Amino acid sequence: MRLKDCVYVLTTVVIILIWYFSINWSKLQELAKQSYKVSDFVTDCENPGLFQSHFGCCPHKHCPVNHFPFHLHSGVADVVAAKICLNNTVIMGGIRSNAGQGLNIVVANGETGQVLRNKNFNLESKDPKELLAYLKTLKPGNIVLVASYIDPTPNLTDEIRDIFSALGSTMVKSLKPRDSWVFAGAYGIKRASPFEKLIQNDMKNNAYEDWPEMGEVIGCFPRISENE
Ligand SMILES: *[C@@H]1O[C@H](CO)[C@@H](O)[C@H](O)[C@H]1NC(C)=O
Ligand SMILES: *[C@@H]1O[C@H](CO)[C@@H](O)[C@H](O)[C@H]1NC(C)=O
């Protein structure tokens, strides 16, 4: 009788263990697949780990000569902040944790690719004049990279929208509360930028209830020569 009980308990334990590991094994395989998909690329982090996602690091992008690789993603709902990478280096967000609510904006020299400034503008609490002043320091040939988080629209005046339009944005004029927006343009570009994504907040179809899916653009920004 005792032995029978023992065998019974043991068998049960073994079955439970097998079941437990098979579930976790498929989960692990799924995770490994995901992280493989997220990066066919090396991540540009100080401590790249097996499951390090591109939310922390930059996906490594190769570009033709005279192009700067960049990567933008807006925030994910109100959980993951926006991120801006240039030259495969995190400038805002990700492992730097310096991105915030509102608009995150990086300004770079379009000829050398050197980052000149980066700043977060929480338009809900800050005077829009600050953003206006920041945008008015732009010089011809400056590249401007923008990624929104939580809500890009409070205090986004027509004057500010006009400036982004002049930088090549075709979508900034239709931005609405809690939309996801990423954009790369340049001062003096004189044409629509192909590097822009707007995902509209739509309560019925949102990926994250109160927020739409994140917007993401990965590309190669053409170098701007001085006498263009
Ligand atoms: C871009 O990255 C390359 C390779 O890491 C580096 O040699 C170069 O100095 C970087 N350029 C800028 C402007 O940071
Ligand atoms: C910014 O927007 C908030 C509401 O979203 C408003 O209370 C505040 O007065 C605005 N600030 C300025 C300087 O317009």
Image (cartoon, rainbow, N blue to C red):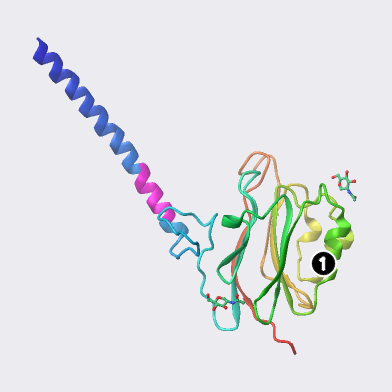
Relative to 8, 33 lies left or right: right
Between 221 and 81, the residue placed more toward the observer is: 81
- Span of residues in magenta: 27-35
Which secondary structure class fits the magenta region best? helix
Relative to 165, 42 lies left or right: left
Relative to 173, 4 lies left or right: left
In the rendered image, the quadrant that contains the C terminus is bottom right
In percent of the image, x 38 and y 47: which residue is there?
A: 30
Find residue 218 and report its image quarter: bottom right
Find residue 19 and report its image quarter: top left
| Residue at the spot of label 1 | 135
Residue 64's place in the image compared with 197, above or below, is: below
* Ligand 1 image-quadrant field: bottom right
Q: Amino acid at mark 1?
A: Leu
- Locate residue 180, reporting x and y percent: 69, 52
The question of residue 116 being in magenta is answered with no
- Locate residue 182, reporting x and y percent: 68, 60
In the rendered image, the quadrant that contains the N terminus is top left
Residue 51's place in the image compared with 134, above or below, is: above
Q: Secondary structure at mark 1?
A: helix
- Locate residue 217, reporting x and y percent: 61, 63
In percent of the image, x 75 and y 61: which residue is there?
A: 171
